[in-house]
Image (spheres, rainbow, N blue to C red):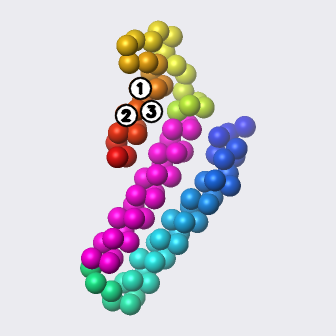
Amino acid sequence: MSHTIREKQKLLNRVRRIKGQVEAIERALEEERGCMDVLQLITSSRGAMNGLLAVVLEDHIRTHLVDVESEDDHGSGKEQLIEVVHSYFK
């Protein structure tokens, strides 16, 4: 079973929150709100989208990628990749 199916409800809840954030951006533009308000809404939705991407990508790595046989001082290849992905989204 795919990790996206196992975590379906959790992922859908995240997507629905993102949808609400994007709709808030649309409303702010329609209401001609200030650019600082719009920028704040955009950065919030971007952060939420990055969070969703990080969760799906991490689950994909854990579920579908195989560890390198030998581990070095930094751990398995899979764990190193996850660490890099986490640092990218900070």
Question: Residues under labels 1 and 3: Cα distance?
Answer: 5 Å
Q: Dot 3: what SS?
A: helix
Residue identifier under label 1 = 80
Q: Tell me where residue 28 sits by quadrant.
A: bottom left
> Which residue is painted at 52% across and 45% down in the image?
55
Residue type at the position of mark 2: Val
Disc 2 residue crowd, few under 14, some 14–19, many 20+, Cα 10 Å: few
> Which residue is painted at 55% across and 22% down in the image?
66
Query: Residue placed farthest to the right in the image?
Result: 1
Please give the range of residues in magenta: 36-60
Tell me where residue 54 appears, x and y as whole percent: 47, 45
Query: Residue placed farthest to the left in the image?
Result: 35
The answer to whether the residue labelled 2 contacts the one labelled 3, judged by CB atoms less than 8 Å apart, is yes
Disc 3 residue crowd, few under 14, some 14–19, many 20+, Cα 10 Å: some
> Which residue is painted at 32% across and 78% down in the image?
37
Residue identifier under label 2 = 84
Give the mark count. Answer: 3
Tell me where residue 4 appears, x and y as whole percent: 64, 45
Q: Which mark is residue 82?
A: 3
Question: Residues under labels 2 and 3: Cα distance?
Answer: 5 Å
